[in-house]
Image (tube, grey):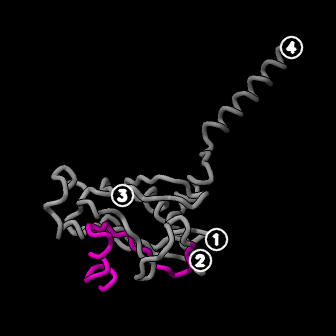
Amino acid sequence: MKKDVIIFLLIIMLCAVFVLTTDFKTVDEYYLENAENIKEGDATVFISIRCDTVFDNAEKLAPALWEFVPEDGVILAETEYVLRDGDTVFDILTRAAKTRRIQMEYSGSAESRTVYIEGISHLYEFSCGELSGWSYLVNGEIPQLGASSYTLSDGDVIEWVYTCDLSRDILQGGVANE
């Protein structure tokens, strides 16, 4: 009887040591932690996030929001991410926001491909006037698809840009023409 109790306690201790010393992660946590571990031959994409259009519309932006606008307007400089099969613009934005701890809010569902980006880095639709919000470009063009519907290819360059004029400020002398 005493021997059984000792064996039982030993098993409990071994289980406790195993649980306390193992770093359990969800699949998402693992991939986020390794999002930037790019190996030779991996398919990759590039993403950047900018809000420099607010500088030309400073009078429209609420004073409290200026603390979220970087001096150069670059929230995320161009960064390379591994492209997984079926990744969309939204998937890469989500991965970048999580790994770089950039505040992002969206509505809709990625599964039903109805995602709408409401805000990034505390800049939301209408934060800089009634025509403001977030737009994205892929390879210098504004796609006619939502971010959760646009499937990426190896080498694509994604640019998220805050617009203050329904993307006209991006297309006329802005990001697409640089």
Q: In the image, what residue type sits under mark 1?
A: Asp
User: Would you name the residue on which mark 3 appears?
Assistant: 120
Marks 1 and 3, the one that precedes in the sequence: 1
User: Would you name the residue on which mark 1 appears?
Assistant: 85
Nearer the observer, disc 2 or disc 1?
Answer: 1
Q: Which residue is drawn at 84% across and 19% down?
A: 4
Distance in Å between CA atoms under marks 1 and 3: 25 Å
Q: In the image, what residue type sits under mark 2?
A: Asp
Distance in Å between CA atoms under marks 2 and 3: 28 Å
Residue 52 image-quadrant placement: bottom left
Distance in Å between CA atoms under marks 4 and 2: 59 Å
**With 123 as the anchor, is 135 left or right in this view?**
right
How many residues crowd mark 2 within 10 Å: few (<14), some (14–19), many (20+)?
Answer: few
Marks 1 and 4, the one that precedes in the sequence: 4
Distance in Å between CA atoms under marks 1 and 4: 57 Å
**With 167 as the anchor, is 96 left or right in this view?**
right
Residue 171 image-quadrant placement: bottom left
Q: In the image, what residue type sits under mark 4?
A: Met
What kind of element bears circle 3? strand
What kind of element bears circle 1? loop
User: Would you name the residue on which mark 2 appears?
Assistant: 42
What kind of element bears circle 4? loop
The magenta stretch spans residue 172: yes
As drawn, the label of residue 109 is none
Marks 3 and 4, the one that precedes in the sequence: 4
Compared to residue 84, the image places residue 28 above or below, namely above
Nearer the observer, disc 3 or disc 4?
Answer: 3
User: Would you name the residue on which mark 4 appears?
Assistant: 1
Q: Give the range drawn in magenta.
A: 151-178
Q: Quadrant of the C terminus?
A: bottom left
For this orientation, the residue located farthest to the right is 1
Horizontal and vertical percent for residue 73? Answer: 25, 67
